[in-house]
Structures are given as C-alpha cells and as structure tokens.
C-alpha cells in the first residue's frame, strides 16, 4: 500500500466510524430476511454455517450473467477480456480486504475446505515426511483436521494437538511445549465455529516462527466479524469461504506468502495452470494461476468481490461492535435462564453462542425453534473433538451477523423459554 492509498484508507475508516450503524437500512438490503417461516418472521441465526446475500451482491451476479459472462484468460474477444478484467479486479479487492502484499498471493478456491486441501497437497506432500510433526488445536473444524490426518497417514507424520480449557481457550503453554526439531507445520482456527472463541493467532504465529515453522490460519469464522490483516498477523497461509461473508457458495480464498506459494507443487493439473504443454514436459504457470486449473467460478469470484465491497462500506469495526453487543445481550439473557448452560465462555469471543438445555436434546430445541421461525444449528458443528473435550454429544448454536437485531435475540430467548415449557 502506498502513502496515498493509506491516507484514503484512513479517511474511509474515519468516515465509517462517524456514520451511525443503520440496522434498518442494512436489513432492507437482505431480501431473504423479509420472509416468514411457518407463519412467523424469519429469525436467521445460522450465520456461522452460511450468511445471507445482500441485494448489491445479487445485483452484481445478475449484471455479470446478463452482460459480462465469457470464459476468462483465453480469448481476445471483448466479453472474455471484460470477464477477465472483472475476475482479476475481484482478486485485487480480496487483496485489499486481507491487506495482502500482492494480488498474486490471493488464490481463488471453492472454499475453506478446498483451500486447506490445496495447502496439504501443495505444501504438505512436498515438505512433510515420516516422523515430522504437525500441530493442530482441539477446536479445529474437521476441514482443518482430516486433510492433515490423510497426509499423516500417507507420510508417517504425526499430529500433535493443542489442548483447550473447559471455557474454550487454547492452552498456550502447552502449545509452546509441543514444538521440537520435527515440527513442520501449524494449523489453527482464528475463531472457533463451535464456541466462538477468538484465538490469539498473532502470538501463536510468532511462537511458530521462532521455531521456523509455517502457520495456516483458518479464517472462515473470523473474516465475517473482524478486520483481518495478513501482513500484521504474519501468517503464512490464510483461508476462508465466500458464503460465510455474504458472498456466493463455491468460492473461497487461499492467501499464501508468495515465496511459499511459489515453492508449492500444484494440486490440480489442467488448463490455465500451465505456460506450455508437450508430451515431453509441462511448464507450470506463475502464481496465482498455477493453482487455478480449469475454468474457475468466475461469477462467484466477482460476487465475492462485491461482498467485500459491501462489508467494507459498512466497516468491519462497526460490524464487530454491533455483533459484540448482540452477543453480550444473548449471553446475559440466555445465561440467566435456569436450565440453560452456555458452552464456550472464553474471554474473547466472536458472534457465536452455543448452549444446551437440561433434559432436552439439542435437535429437539432446534426443531421447536424452527416452528417459531428461528433458524439455529444443532449438532457437533463439524468440530467433534470440541464436543469430546466438553463431554457433550451436541449443542444448540446461535450465530449472529451484523444484520441481526436485538429484537431477534429477544425472540431467541423467548423461543428457548417456550421449548423449556414444552419439556417441563
Ligand atoms: N473452518 C471453519 C472454522 C468453519 O466454520 C467451516 C465451516 O463451517 C469450515 C472450515 C469449512 O468451510 P467450507 O465448508 O465453506 O469449506
């Protein structure tokens, strides 16, 4: 970022800070929120699974499909050049969103899971050997566990796990003690999808780097809720999904430091990821194209660019403030109900509230809340090691977005009380 861009960034941040957070105007941008479910106004509290899409992002997708679509990078005709320009412009928007040093450090993937698998295949299979160790944490989503288990099985590497407290905080002393001469990689989620805990990833990255070990941060639950600066974090890889960020499904991002990406082997082979092909040998393309074989999700990438524009106009700091207030309200009101146990009480949390009710299975809670139009998630949230650690089969999870209102938190609390009455 040059000095002028930095000035503009500060001016935009100052303007956003001065703007009131206009919840009604924001909610009006989300057509899906205007509907009724089972005859009740929809209260959508499943944002950690997937967030909703505002009209400007929908409009952007429609504009692309109706006036700009062609395959990219491959033709000289006008539409192809336009689509290519828009696709690469989306990459630059994502670069700005993450404050990556260069646009070529942003790889479009189909989502977080795809991005982690890319790093496992591209980096892990090249650099991790029998006897090497990979550090993960108890609170990883399965997407940041299973690919590394597959690698460990294939190579004979070992996975070491950072424990967590009952409140849902990582044990940092134990983390530091896991490093040794065989440690090759760290994978850590910035925000737990099951508990909402915000992990101190910047400090954890510094610890890993002191041992010369690269770190992948799973930002799937972080980017929708807080500003992220990959250069400030100094992470080696950062991954997230578009559909949790008001963007389309089928698109996600792998950020990687250029030198690491260049050293990686490609994961998928095919068109666009090559400079030349012959039966004698193939020369791979430069990054980012080396990792984007075949026709990418062009519309989805452009849609994701529109989504980060939309979020940027509201401002991630304002979003974080609003969601924090919702979380505090929900924590206080639900926590005060007899028979409700909050699960995950870390000191630093993002907008996720997991809980269980005495004597009621979480699936029954979810089913009855749905009858009131309230969408929550129930189950293990693809984080079974968290449930095992807490000796729970499942929880109810309400997860908030910036378009949720205090009245919706009240509706959730009233819904939970109604469920308790059914089972009293
Ligand atoms: N990591 C975390 C922390 C998540 O919450 C999720 C989805 O819930 C994923 C990874 C997987 O994301 P996706 O299914 O979009 O690949």
Image: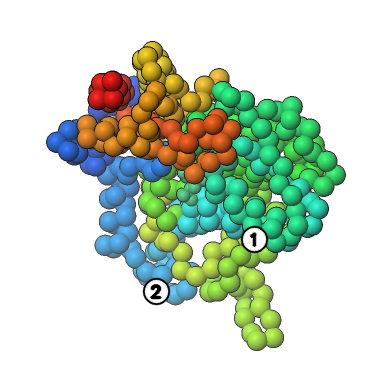
In the rendered view, would you say 384 is above or below 62? above
Can residue 422 be seen in this snapshot? yes
Task: Name above or below for residue 111 compared with residue 83.
Answer: above
| Label number found at residue 77 | 2
Q: Quadrant of residue 83?
A: bottom left
Q: Which residue occupies 70% across, 55% down?
A: 152
Q: Residue 256: horizontal and vertical position, in percent?
A: 63, 50
- The Cα atoms of the two marked residues, 2 and 1, are separated by 35 Å
Tell me if mark 1 has few (under 14), some (14-19) or many (20+) residues whose alpha carbon lies within 10 angstroms of its own. Answer: many
- Is residue 327 rendered to the left or right of residue 271? left
Residue 214 appears in the picture as rendered:
no
Q: Secondary structure at mark 2?
A: loop
Front: mark 2 or 1? 1
Identify the element where label 1 is drawn.
helix
- In which quadrant will I find the C terminus? top left
Judged left or right of residue 237, residue 404 is: left
Q: Which mark is residue 121?
A: 1
* Front residue of this view, candidates 201 and 353: 353
The answer to whether 214 is drawn above or below residue 226 in the figure is below
The residue shown at (39%, 20%) is 340
């Amino acid at each position: 970022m040059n000095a002028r861009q930095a000035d503009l960034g500060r001016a935009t941040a100052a303007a956003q800070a001065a703007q009131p957070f206009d919840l009604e105007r924001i909610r009006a941008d989300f057509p899906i929120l205007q509907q009724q479910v089972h005859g009740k106004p929809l209260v959508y509290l499943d944002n950690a699974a997937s967030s909703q899409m505002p009209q400007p992002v929908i409009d952007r997708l429609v504009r692309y499909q109706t006036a700009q679509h062609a395959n990219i990078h491959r033709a000289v005709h006008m539409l192809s050049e336009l689509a290519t320009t828009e696709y690469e412009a989306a990459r630059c928007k994502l670069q700005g969103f993450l404050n990556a040093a260069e646009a070529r450090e942003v790889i479009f993937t189909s989502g977080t899971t795809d991005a982690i698998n890319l790093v496992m295949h591209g980096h892990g299979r090249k650099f991790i050997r029998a006897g090497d160790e990979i550090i993960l944490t108890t609170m990883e989503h399965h997407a940041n566990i299973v690919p590394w288990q597959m690698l460990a099985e294939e190579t004979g590497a070992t996975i070491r796990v950072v424990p967590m407290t009952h409140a849902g905080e990582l044990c940092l002393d134990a983390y530091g003690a896991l490093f040794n001469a065989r440690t090759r990689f760290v994978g850590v989620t910035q925000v737990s999808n099951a508990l909402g805990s915000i992990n101190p990833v910047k400090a954890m990255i510094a610890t890993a780097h002191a041992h010369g070990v690269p770190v992948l941060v799973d930002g799937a639950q972080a980017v929708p809720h807080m500003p992220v600066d990959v250069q400030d974090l100094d992470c080696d890889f950062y991954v997230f999904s578009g559909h949790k960020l008001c963007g389309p499904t089928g698109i996600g991002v792998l950020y990687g430091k250029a030198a690491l990406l260049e050293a990686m082997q490609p994961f998928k082979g095919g068109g666009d990821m090559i400079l030349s092909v012959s039966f004698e040998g193939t020369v791979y393309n430069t990054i980012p194209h080396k990792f984007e074989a075949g026709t990418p999700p062009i519309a989805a990438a452009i849609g994701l660019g529109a989504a980060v524009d939309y979020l940027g106009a509201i401002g991630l700091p304002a979003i974080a403030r609003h969601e924090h207030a919702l979380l505090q309200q929900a924590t206080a009101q639900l926590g005060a109900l007899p028979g409700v146990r909050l699960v995950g009480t870390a000191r630093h949390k993002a907008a996720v509230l997991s809980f269980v009710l005495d004597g009621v299975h979480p699936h029954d809670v979810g089913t009855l809340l749905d009858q009131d139009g309230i969408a929550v998630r129930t189950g293990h949230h693809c984080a079974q090691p968290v449930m095992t650690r807490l000796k729970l089969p499942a929880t109810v999870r309400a997860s908030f977005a910036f378009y949720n209102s205090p009245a919706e938190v009240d509706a959730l609390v009233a819904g939970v009380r109604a469920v308790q009455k059914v089972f009293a």
